[in-house]
Image: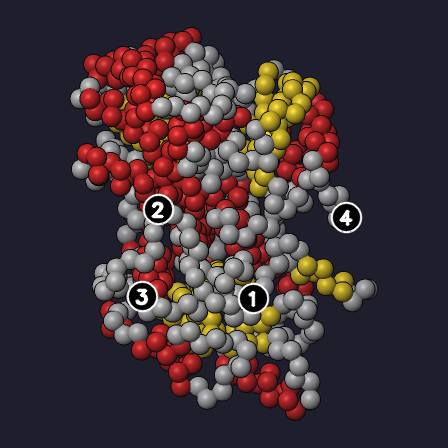
Amino acid sequence: MLGNNHPIRLQTMTTTDTMDTIGTVEQTIRCIEAGAELVRITAPSKKEAENLRNIKEELKRRGYNTPLIADIHFTPNAAEIAARIIEKVRVNPGNYVDKKKFEFIDYTDSEYVEEIDRIRDRFTPLVRICRQYGTAMRIGTNHGSLSDRIMSRYGDTPMGMVESAMEFLRIARAESYHNIILSMKSSNPQVMVQAYRMLIQQMMQEFNECYPLHLGVTEAGDGEDGRVKSAAGIGTLLEDGIGDTIRVSLTEDPEFEIPVCLDLVKRYSAPVSLRGELSATPAALFIPPLEGRGATYDPFVYKRRTSFAVDNMGDKQVPVVMADLSKIENITAKDLESIGYSYNEITDKWSISDSAADYVFTGNQILPFALPGTLKMVVYPSAWEQVVTEAVQAGTAGEPTYFPIFSDSGYATSEIKSPHLNFVMFDCFSDDTIVNDFTYLDAVANDKTVVICLSSTNKHAMPAIRRMFMEMQQRDIESPVVIICDSYWQTADEHLIHYATECGALLLDGFGDGICLGMTSHAYKNSSVTNASGRNYLNNATVEQFINSTAFSILQATRTRISKTEYISCPSCGRTLFELQETTAKIRAVTNHLKGVKIAIMGCIVNGPGEMADADFGYVGSGVGKITLYRGKEVVKRNVNSDIAVSELILLLKESDAWVEPVV
Ligand code: SF4
């Protein structure tokens, strides 16, 4: 049971060869035991589709009746076989009928209608089989594999993705077949979120009803980056009540995807009593509706909120990262290593990494050592006053490095403020009593020394903060804003999902000129540095390092600030032609210093080139032991032996001026 008010179902996809019945059965069982409620298996041709029967029977014999899904690309005949055997088929409207040639074709309206008729002829038999056998279907659009026809008319856009699915949906509805789920996946969470929102709008406009939705970010990669990207995309939609089943695509064994799915979903099913410290102080849930001029942002188009600059925040500047070191007692120079600053005593110099925090909040601590030149400190007003007084007495008051952070009422009543930069905190809709009182907000509005910090302890913190952004837009307040997000969870995965969902959702809508991630005191003390599958993200480092790296990963995933190489790697499946996890790790090891370069690592030539979306370079399996290398969509080296393919990729990066030597 899926859709409507049923729980959000968790699913994954096997990576084994579908002809390996026992291997596929055993991997499916591992996924089911981990919590998968549906399992997808690739059926690249008729023989694999036929073998789904053996897999299903063997699973049944071992006591497992979990619904299976056949994954179909390019092969209607395989789909028509699978639909008679298992519970669901997934078709990709970009390649079910069309072959991808990356050609631009200028169709007249009548030629376009003829194309739709051609699709109807080829797709209707599958619809009829599904209707006859009670088989469900996912119409699964991928941003990277839109047909040449859709690309020619709509371009590489969310609207193109929506239309691609709608063409198939209209045909199915005309056959009175409604057992349908839809998806709009992309490796870019921004595109994916907009496409799902547009699809809902389009279905409501045309049919006045919505079909269930399967959510996912494709080719998200592995480890922390894969989880953050998935959570930013999937979590943003779940926060708004969108989504009936989810799949987190990681370049890892499929059973490791399920704990991430569970973490994403339990945020909406866990009773308040499981939500850490919040249970002690249940927050108000009420978020007042918008009145007056209505929503002033467009959820279908990314546009960064207009703000003016205060110091290095706001306007067109990339969002800043504020690290919270306030829970460390007696902060030392060594502690700054966690946030990207390493001090060399011999040279008396700081080295600064690409993911070094811009600001550090230390509470009341004034650091007893000279700071790296680019780092700025944020402290409570009494500590700031002390710094200012001491500097005046010592005659050293120059360029300030310490700035105060006030409460909203504190700023209004304080007689001493920084003439340069003041941070002012606002709690968004966490308490019924202040819901309609914006006196303090109006008091700081458009003050050219103020950066507003928004946080919320409301159980629904993201919508509460988003509502405050809208309030500010209605009041024409263009002050820059830092989003403060505290986590009350425990494991690394839970924290990652929390931060990526809450901040990712706001950044994807263009809100936020900075982020500051932290933990409640309870979570900080009890935090486990391992995730649910026992993997340690922290590499024996500190909670602060974990949080800092997560902050930069969120900015990278939402494409608001690029600080590292981006990997678009497929999760692998029965079509994969090489050891994808090992190869991804190898490529990552030699290219992870190439800030801003997007490298795709794709398991097969059938789907890889299309699905690698906007990657700058592609490493694609094209035969057993053979790799084809791409620059953008252009094939540069065909069928290179896999044992030299990584070196050839480096050569290609060098030839394309995308390579820099790593700093030792
Ligand atoms: S790109 Fe990867 S996941 Fe997609 S079909 Fe090919 S091997 Fe399978």
Tell me the residue that label 2 is attached to.
300
Kind of residue at badge 1: Asn
Kind of residue at badge 2: Phe
Q: Residue most toward the bottom?
A: 393
Q: Residue most toward the right?
A: 346
Choose the circle earlier in sequence order: 4 or 1: 1
Is there CB contact under 8 Å for labels 2 and 3? no
Kind of residue at badge 4: Val
Mark 2 vs mark 4, foreground winner is: 2
Q: Is residue 376 above or below residue 386?
A: above
Q: Position of residue 164 (x, y in %)?
A: 35, 28
**Disc 1 packing (10 Å; few <14; some 14–19; many ≥20):** some
In this rendered view, identify the residue nearer to me: 620 or 70.
620
Q: Quadrant of the N terminus?
A: top left
Choose the circle earlier in sequence order: 1 or 2: 2
Residue 582, visible in the rendered structure: no
The dot on residue 474 is 3
The dot on residue 664 is 4
Element under disc 1: loop
Is there CB contact under 8 Å for labels 1 and 3? no
Kind of residue at badge 3: Gln
Element under disc 3: helix
Real-space Cα separation, disc 1 to disc 3, in angstroms: 25 Å
Mark 1 vs mark 3, foreground winner is: 3
Q: Residue at x 27, y 15 (%)?
A: 124
Residue 113 in the figure: left or right of residue 343? left
Real-space Cα separation, disc 1 to disc 2, in angstroms: 28 Å
Real-space Cα separation, disc 2 to disc 3, in angstroms: 19 Å
